Image (spheres, grey):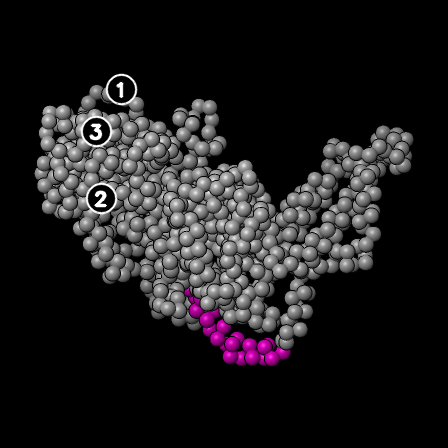
Amino acid sequence: MAPRTGSDTLVSQIPAGPWQAALEYATDAFQRSVLYADVMRQRGNQYQAHMAKQAPHVLSMEFEQIESGDTLPRPVNYSLVRILPPADAPVDPRKRPFVIVDPRAGHGPGIGGFKPESEIGVAVRAGHPCYFIGFLPQPVPGQTVEDVMRAEAHFLETVIARHPEAEGKPVVVGNCQAGWQVMMTAAMRPELFGAIILAGAPLSYWAGWRGMNPMRYFGGLVGGSWLTAYTSDLDGGKFDGAWLVQNFENLNPANTLWSKQYNLYSKVDTEAERYLGFEKWWGGHVFLNREEIQYIVDNLFVGNKFTSGELVTSDGIRLDIRNVRAPIIVFCSRGDNITPPPQALGWITDLYQDDNEVRAHGQTIVYAVHDSIGHLGIFVSGSVARKEHQEFTCNIDMIDVLPPGIYEAEISDKTPDTPNADLAQGNYVLNFGRRHLDDIREIVQQKPEDDRRFAAVARISEINLGLYRSFVQPWVRHVISTPVAELMQRLHPMRLSYELFSDRNPVASPVAPLAEQVRESRQPVSPDNPFLVAEKMGSHVLESGLDIWTKLRDDWVERVFMAVYGSPLVQDLAGLGGDTSPIRKHPGISPEHREFMAQRAIELRGLMETGGLREACLRLLIYVSAAQGGIDERSFNLIRRMRAGKDNVLALDEFKDVVRDQALMMMLDREAALAATRVLLSRASARDIRAGFQDMEQVVTAGLPMTEAAGQRLEDMRELFEAAAKEAENGKARAPAATGATAAQAGARKASPRAARPRKVIASTRSAPVKAAAAEAALAKPPAAASKPPARKTTKTATAGKTPAPRKRAPRKTAA
C-alpha cells in the first residue's frame, strides 16, 4: 500500500472519536464507489469485446477444433473441440474420453471449463481425453432440436473413432439444458454412450415441491406457450436468450437487485476478478431459432412429453429413456430453485412402477442430492468440482460395472481412521447405497391433483397458441421488420445494463484515471468501524426485506395457479372433466421388449452353469454385497488391483457384461444360481478355489462395515467354497464347461442340499432379495396395472415351499 499523504495527514490530526470514524468511513466509501464504477466500466468493455468475437466462449483451457456442425447434412451452430491437456497432466489413451456439453439456455458456452477446478479440469487432471461441445451465438436458419441431437450423435461417433484403445465408450456430461438434450440423443442412439452425468438437468417438468419451486407455474399464469411464439415474432423469427436469463434473475430479486452488486462493492479490492469472470459468461446472451424454443416449451416445459414416451423423431424413432443402457448419474441439489430434485429425479417414477422394471430394462441409475448448493454451483462451484465431480470421474469405471438398479452416491470425508484409506482416491470415500423406487417417490412427492392442473395448462396452451397463430401472428410479423427486431434486441434490459456503461459512453471516460488514483492511495476502513457495521446491517435488512417480498410473491403465484387450474370449470373447459383416469399414464412396455426379456430369461437360465471360478466369485460378491446395502469404492479399487496383477484379464466392457449377467441370474433365480455355483467351482483346483474365496473376502470387507446378514452370507459361501475345494482335493474329475438349460438343471441336481438352499438371513429393507417369480415376471411378462407398486413379499426358494431357518453356529474369526 502507498504511504499516506494529503487527506491521510488530515485524518491523523483529527481527535479520535466518532468524527474520525465518520471521516475514515466516508473516505473508504468514496473510494469503493469509484472502484465499483471502474469495475462496471470494465464489465461493459469486456461485454463488447466478447460479443464481437465470432465464437465467444469462457473456456479457461487451450483447445483445438475437431469438427464444425455447419458442415453436416443438417447443419447446426454446434462444434466439437478437443481440450489440450497441460504438460503436467498427460492423457492415458486407455481411459475413456469425457465429452462435456454446455447448456444453451440463454448464455454462451464454456461454463463447464470456466476455471481449472471444473468438470473439464477434473477430467483432464484424471488423465482422460476431454472434449467439449459448444455453440455459436446465432443458430443456423431452420435448425431444430432434432438436428442438434443428430449432430451430437455424429460428434460422439467422431470421438469414439479417435480412441479405439479406450476401455469404454465416452462419458457424456450434460449441464442444465444440455442434460435433457443429451438424454434425447441417448434415447435415439444408446450405443454411443458409456455413461451419462446429468448436472442440474430437468427431465420431469411438472414435478416440484409446493411452496418452494414457483418457476413451474409461470407457463400457466401467462396462458401457455403463445407468449413464446409472440416473443420469437418480435425478434424476427429468433428467440433472444436474454429473456431466459431474465427469468433466472427474477427468481431471486434479492440477489439480482442488491446482494450480487453489494458483494462486489463491499469487497471491491479482491472481488473484481471473480465478478468480471462470471459476468463474462452471464452476459454472453445467445439466440435460439423459433422452431427450437417452441418445441422445447410445447413438448417439455408445458407438455412434459419426454418422460411419457410421446416424443417421436422425424424418422419414427420413439424417444424412450428406458432404451438408454449406459449408467445414468443424476446430480441435483435441494438448494436449486431452477432444477429441484423432483424435476431431476421425477422421470424415474414417471417411467417405472417397481424396482424389477428398472432391472429388467438393464438400467443403472445413480443419484446424488446436495443439501444446499444453488443451480449454477452444481457445475461452476470449485468445492463441488473437488468433491462430487472428482469422485464421479475417478470412479466412473466402477459405476459402469454396477448391476442394474437404483443407487445413491454417498460421499464421506477420508480421515486417518478410515479403514483401507489407501484404496480410496482423493480426500473422500464414495459409496453406492442400494435404493428402491419408493426412495425416489419420497423425494419426488408426486401429487395426482397437481398433475391434473398441469395437464389443464397444456390443453389451454394448445388452444391459446392456435388462436394466436390464426388471429395475431400474421399482424405481428407484418409489423416487425429486421431492423426493428435488431433494435429491440439491443434495447433489451439485460443488454442495456452492459452496453450503457463502457468507454463508449463519455460519462465513463473520467472513471479509469480516477480509479487509478484511488488505487494508489487506497485507505480501507477498519472492519470494526461503527459506520461500516451499520452499512452491513442495513444491507442485511434490505436483503431480508427483498427475500420476504419474494416469498410473498411466490406464495401468491402458487395460490393463483392452484385456484385457477384446480377449478372444475377450467378443467372442464380444458376437456379433462370427464376423464377420471390418471393423467400421467405409464408409457407401457412394448411387445418386442417383453419378447426380448422372455428370451433373455431363458438364455440366463441356460447360462447358470456356464463359466468357472470367475463367475463363482462374482456370485459370491453379489450375494454378500446385497445384504451389505451397497458397495464401496475401496472394494472396487481392490478388485482393480487384483486384476492388474493377473494374466488373461477381461477388458472392462467384457468384465461389465459378465458382472451384469451374473447379477441378472441372481435376480432371476437366486437359489438356482447359487446351486449352480458348486458346478462352476468343480472346474477349478482346490488351491484356486481357496485363493478365490480369500480374494473375495478381502473385497467385501475392504469397504463398508459388514452387517450381520452379510457376515452370515459370507460364512455360507465359505462353506460352499471349502466343500468344493475338498472335492477337488479328493480327486474328483472336473466338470466340463456346461451350456444350455439342460446342463443347468443337471448342475442343480448335483449340488448339495445346502448349496441348493443357502440359508435365509434377515436383510435390511434396502437389500431384500428379489423373488424369483417376481423377477421372471419383470423379465418376461407385462406388469399388472396398479396405482402403486405391489407390496414386497417374503422370498421363497424355487424348489420348496419354505426356506429352512438358518442354522445357528458359533461366530468364526474372519477378516469380516
Cα–Cα gap, marks 1 and 2: 31 Å
Front-most of residues 411 and 653: 653
Front-most of residues 771 and 400: 400
Nearer the observer: mark 1 or 3; the answer is: 3
Q: Residues within 10 Å of mark 3 (few under 14, many from 20)?
A: many
Is residue 596 something that shows in the picture? yes
Residue drawn at (78%, 59%) of the image = 505
Residue 712, horizontal then vertical, whole percent:
24, 28
* SS for dot 2: helix
Residue drawn at (51%, 55%) of the image = 66
Residue 106, horizontal then vertical, whole percent:
57, 59
Cα–Cα gap, marks 3 and 2: 21 Å
Residue 689's label in the rendered image is: 3
* Residue type for callout 1: Lys
* SS for dot 3: helix
* Residue type for callout 3: Ile
Q: Residues within 10 Å of mark 1 (few under 14, many from 20)?
A: few
Q: According to the image, label 1 marks what residue?
A: 813
Q: Is residue 464 magenta?
A: yes
Q: Earlier in the sequence, mark 1 or mark 3?
A: 3
Q: Give, as a single range, the part of the protein colored magenta.
A: 453-479
- Classify residue 8 as left or right of residue 629: right
Residue 481, horizontal then vertical, whole percent:
63, 76
Q: According to the image, label 2 marks what residue?
A: 665
* Residue type for callout 2: Met
Q: Name the main secondary structure of what is drawn in magenta.
A: helix
Is residue 328 something that shows in the picture? no
- Classify residue 383 as left or right of residue 689: right
